Amino acid sequence: MPDVSAIDIEVANTEWMDVSPDFTPQRHDFSGEVESTLMTLISRKSTTNNENEPPRDGPNRDTLYKIRPLVQHFSAVFSKAFTPLQDICIDESLLLYKGRIIFKQYIPLKRARFGIKIFCLTDSNGYLHSFRIYSGKDDPVTNLDNDIPQECRDMSVTAKTTLALMKKFLNKGYHLFIDNWYTSVPLLEFLHGMQTMCTGTARANRVPRELKNSKVPKGQIKSMTKGPLLAQKFEDKKTVYMMTTSHGAETVSKLRHGGQERTIPKSIDTYNKNMGGVDRIDQMLEPDDTTRKTVRWYVKLAIHLIQIAIMNGWTLFRKQGGQKDFYTFSRNVVAAFVFRDGDIPTLENEDLTRLTARHFIYEIPPTQGKLRPQKRCKVCYKTGRLRDTRFYCPSCPSKPGLCLGECFEKYHTKESL
């Protein structure tokens, strides 16, 4: 397993450096460098020449041509860095994009609803091991038939997608969890023959007709078997169909909110515990989404892959006992990118400096991108207010933004803010 405590996850072909746990640079201090570094990384890994791009209406067209090297790089890195444990899941993620691209998808149950669909294979902790970007059903480069056994080429698209992601995990005793978009009888039977267990929710039109039409009282379960395959109908607030090759008809007791006990199939219990890996990634990345509305789709997708790489690094870091939260870990990675030549600033004791040295307030100088830049006032932020200011103190190590007058005085005279 890689030494992710030193942040050496291979996001780029650069040497990573240790970053002190208490290194917390101000966002405005290197926001321009971050953008420049990301663009340099994307340019270095996306080395395609537009003049060599195959004709878009030709037999060798590649919809993802502009970022194909980057996609191949991250696919190799993610699968090499960590081997997942027994329980894995497949689900789709949707990267928000409302521009015009021929492979844009609409998924009403996703938060983004419109965007670029990415099929992901993760473990239950959220480490993304492999992925496939949906680029249209007629894209010859991403044709599913290229990555699945020949005897499976007559299966449904959902089954082919699952098998393409699972090609490195067959015949190894893994337990796969999938939702009702993927689950089907032929898929589960094939996986069982390849020594791979599978549990998933199912759609009503994919279960036996006798099971679908059966009358089941609320809170009760009806099960049917076909060889190693178990199909179940569970009446809860809604009707839930399950298929599994891992469980029998066992049940477990669970407490509802309020202390009321209920009985559910064991297949549902294990499904709920292991199916959330992709949703966990989306939840962690959504608050710090760095992509912008105006960027081209391939730049947005490239930045998203870099964010997933950082997320994977943090997941491995936590597996080794690391205690940093994702936000702090991400800032350390960004700092290692920006100051990769070794010029990582060491911050002095902020309290000692701000209370003893001589301080003068200055207007924040203009930058290349902003004529009148602003910073968040540190004193206002400590009191629960969000206020930007045009002034800062260049003498303090962190160069904090401070409102003119009371905030500047309080910051340099009060021990407790």
Image: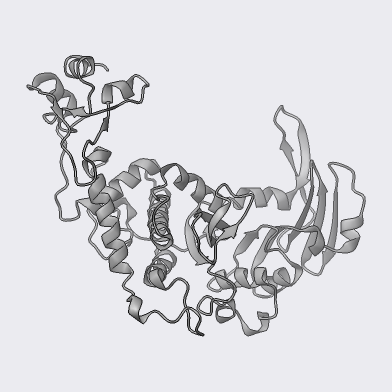
Q: Nearer the viewer, residue 291 or 211?
A: 291
Identity of the residue drawn at 63% across and 73% down: 160
Identity of the residue drawn at 33% across and 54% down: 4
**Quadrant of the snapshot with the C terminus:** top left
* 116 over 360 or under it: above or below: below
The x, y position of residue 143, in whole percent, is 56, 77
Q: Nearer the viewer, residue 312 or 64?
A: 64
State whether residue 89 appears in this view: no
Identity of the residue drawn at 37% across and 68% down: 70
Total marks in image: 0
State whether residue 386 appears in this view: yes
Q: Nearer the viewer, residue 358 or 263?
A: 358
Judging from the image, the colouring scheme is: one colour
The x, y position of residue 215, in whole percent, is 92, 50
Q: Nearer the viewer, residue 165 or 137?
A: 137
**Quadrant of the snapshot with the N terminus:** bottom left
* 63 over 93 or under it: above or below: below
| The residue positioned farthest toward the left in the image shown | 358
The x, y position of residue 26, in whole percent, is 25, 37
Is residue 113 toward the left or the right of residue 241 in the image? left
Is residue 185 toward the left or the right of residue 148 in the image? right
* 369 over 210 or under it: above or below: above
